[in-house]
Each structure stands twice: as structure tokens, then as C-alpha cells.
Image (cartoon, rainbow, N blue to C red):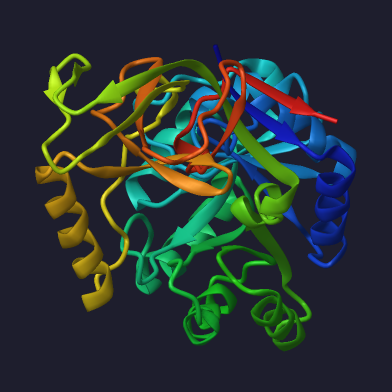
Amino acid sequence: MSLDLRVDGPRWRHHLRSVAGSTPGLVPVAKGNGYGLGLGSLARRAEWLGVDTLAVGTYDELLEVAQRFPGDLLVLTPWRPWVAPLAPELRKRVIHTVSRPDDLGALTTQEPGARVVLERMTSMRRHGLSAAELWDLAPVARRRARVEGVAIHLPMTGANGPEVMRLMDDVVGAEANAVWVSHLTTAELSRLQSAYPDITVRPRVGTGLWLGDRGALEVTAKVLDVHALSRGDSYGYRQRRLTSTQPGGHLVIASGGTAHGIGLAAPSGSGGLRGRAAVAAKGGLETLGVLRSPYLLDGKPLHFAEPPHMQASMLLLPRGARVPEVGEALGVRVRYTATTFDSVTIS
């Protein structure tokens, strides 16, 4: 009764080597659920790739990766005064992100000589220092800490080359010897490295590295039960019935539910007319009790019979469709960063 992720190991490892080979200064990112693969697994692969630094999302993730990766550890979430002091054995390895002037003093009081990157505010407007703050803080930071460079976290809309080039004026003004960047294309990275040969470029890459070859990843769920349905039959927690326009079919019970992330959706990232129309259409289907599920039978999507349960989902199979056997595997399309798998197998 499981939701399983199987990874074609040779193909996946070939992709990892390809990305590492074409990305000088690569800093793999391992955060959250480890992109569905697990933080520990990614930490071991980062060591296998031979990189010197691994980035994590939060301080809480450090312990899980520190035992499996021997190099430096960059924490992407900026340090704040409520962060607990690091264990002594981690202090030489961890690089903190500083995004507010006041935090530098508090951090170096707690941890004199701490390793830091200073984060410059970008059009993301999430964390970061203004140009003036960066210029003022950089010389102070060099006296009180070990400055590893400036961090620039760009949006995911693409075409970030012009913005990063503008911000590099501030990196140069801060006399930084390295810039840690997110969400630049290979071409943008190449132009950046060519334009600033005296500054080390450290690309932080997560999705493109671990999930960049989706063909190497396969998610499946088990068919747990199959029941014939006739017009007027009721089913599920909410006791829905087949309508007069539904001639019957089958109810398929499949492994995977809300505990795995099935059926849970983040807000839509598309603000265009097409994206809003898709959301409106989906909402209309939901009001009719019809919603396409991520489950696939013979490559065709099935519809939820009702909202997914915690560990299983009920799916409607229309009359005339091939009826799967109990124990058969169904394909599942998932958002890896929001899915918890019962098993992850890497060949």
C-alpha cells in the first residue's frame, strides 16, 4: 500500500555529472523534503559529485546533511537572533547568510569570526540589503567575520542576466571576491563569469540538478481495490451517487493520499489570462464534483471520485475503460517538492 518513487540510477547519475561538469563552482541545494529524494540522499550525492559546498534551506536541516557531506554548508535562510548557537564542530563548516545590518553584530557576538555571505536585495524583495547597506556593512563584516562573498537570489521568471549585471556593480563596490547566485541560465552564468573574471561565481542549483531529467524518475501507486458501479450507487465518505448522466463504470481505490501530498495544491504561479482561465475551469469542475487526479491508467488521467483520503484515493473509471487488476501499478504525476513517498529506490 505505497506511493513509490523509482529512479533510473545510471541515467540520473549521468545527468548529475553533466550538470556538475557544465556548471563551474556548482553549489547543490538540498532543502525541504530533498526534492522528494530525501536530504540525506542528496547530501551523499553531493559528496559523490566532488563539490566543496552544499546549500541547505534552514538551520534545522543542517544535522541531517552534515553527517553525510563533509564539506562546507551554506544556509540560505538568513540568520536571525533566535537561531540557536551552532554545535562547535559545525562552526567552521557553516556559512551564514546575513540580510540585515543589525544581525551581523548579534551573530558575531554569539559566534566571533563567523563565516558569512551578505545578501543583496533583488527584485524578489524577499530578503536582502540595499546597495548603501551593503557598501556600509561590507568593511564592518570583514573586520568582525569571515566574508565569503555576496549572495544574489533572483526570481524564476527567466531573463535574469540584465538584473544580475546591474547588481554586480554593488558586488564590486563591496569589494567581494565571490558572488553566490540562484536562477541563472548556463548562458547567463557564462556571460557573468566572462565579465567578472576576478570574482568567483558560485551557482546555487536545486531543481535543475536533482529533477532536471524527469525521464529518470517514475512515480507509481498500487491499485488496492476495484468495485463495479451502477447508476444510482453511492460511494465514499460523502456518499456521492452516480448521476443519471453517468451510466456506470468502476471505482478504483489507489494508494496515496493527502498524507503523501496527493490532492494538495499550492496557489497557481500563472497570472496570465490562460492561467486564470485554467483556475476558473478547474473551480467549475470542482463544483460539479469532477476533478482530474494525478493518477494515470495506460497514460490517461483518471478523475477523483471524491477528495483524496489521508492514505488512499478513490478514482472513477468510466464504463468501457480497461479495468486494472488489484496490485497493478498506476502512474502518478506529482510535484516532487511537495510529495512524501513511502519508498525511494535508486538503481
* Residue at x 85%, y 48% (from the top left corner): 11
* Residue at x 38%, y 65% (from the top left corner): 121
Tell which of 73 and 140 is nearer to you.
Answer: 73
| Horizontal and vertical percent position of residue 183 | 55, 66
**Can see residue 333?**
yes
Left of 122 or right of it: where is 296? right
Left of 341 or right of it: where is 188? right
User: Is the residue 85 above or below the residue 299 in the image?
Assistant: above
| Horizontal and vertical percent position of residue 309 | 31, 18
Q: Quadrant of residue 151?
A: bottom right
Left of 143 or right of it: where is 265? left
| Horizontal and vertical percent position of residue 261 | 40, 29
User: Is the residue 122 above or below the residue 118 in the image?
Assistant: below
Left of 18 or right of it: where is 86? left
**Can see residue 50?**
no
* Residue at x 67%, y 81% (from the top left corner): 192
- The quarter of the rendered structure image containing the C terminus is top right
* Residue at x 54%, y 11% (from the top left corner): 1
